[in-house]
Amino acid sequence: MNWEQIREEHPNQWVVFEALAAHDEDKKRIIDKLSLVNAFGEDSISAWKHYAQLHRENPHSEYYVYHTTHEKLDIGIIDGLGRILS
């Protein structure tokens, strides 16, 4: 699945997805293939709680919370100190 498909199926919603294939490019995380975990409508708090639970249960998986109003995924890379690389 790709981001365009998720946006089409879940317009104007907060979603949690897992990156199945990704790489770094120009200080950005490029998601090549993803899997929708869940859609939350406009409930961002529930989306973030679900993300936190998934991250605790599967710390080596790559999960994201994003709103489908964004045409493209724009995910910065965070260094070991929690700073976004730019």
Image (cartoon, rainbow, N blue to C red):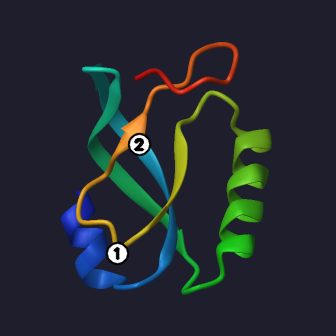
Find the residue positioned furthest to the top. 80
Image coordinates for residue 47, horizontal then vertical, percent: 66, 68
Circle 2 — which element?
strand
Q: Is residue 11 left or right of residue 40?
A: left
Image coordinates for residue 81, horizontal then vertical, percent: 70, 15
Residue in view at x 65 percent, y 74 percent: 44
Q: Does residue 1 appear in the picture of this structure?
A: no
Q: Vertical placement of 13 versus 36: above or below?
A: below
Image coordinates for residue 50, horizontal then vertical, percent: 72, 62
**Mark 1 neighbour class, 10 Å CA radius: few under 14, some 14 to 19, many 20 or more:** few
Q: Which residue is mark 1?
A: 69
Which residue occupies the foreground of this view, 42 or 21? Answer: 42
- Residue 34: mark: none
Residue in view at x 54 percent, y 71 percent: 38
Q: Vertical placement of 37 versus 86: above or below?
A: below
Q: Which residue is mark 2?
A: 19
Q: Amino acid at mark 1?
A: Thr
Which residue occupies the foreground of this view, 57 or 17? Answer: 17
Q: Amino acid at mark 2?
A: Ala
Q: Vertical placement of 86 versus 62: above or below?
A: above
Q: Distance of mark 2 from mark 1, alpha carbons?
A: 19 Å
Q: Quadrant of the C terminus?
A: top left
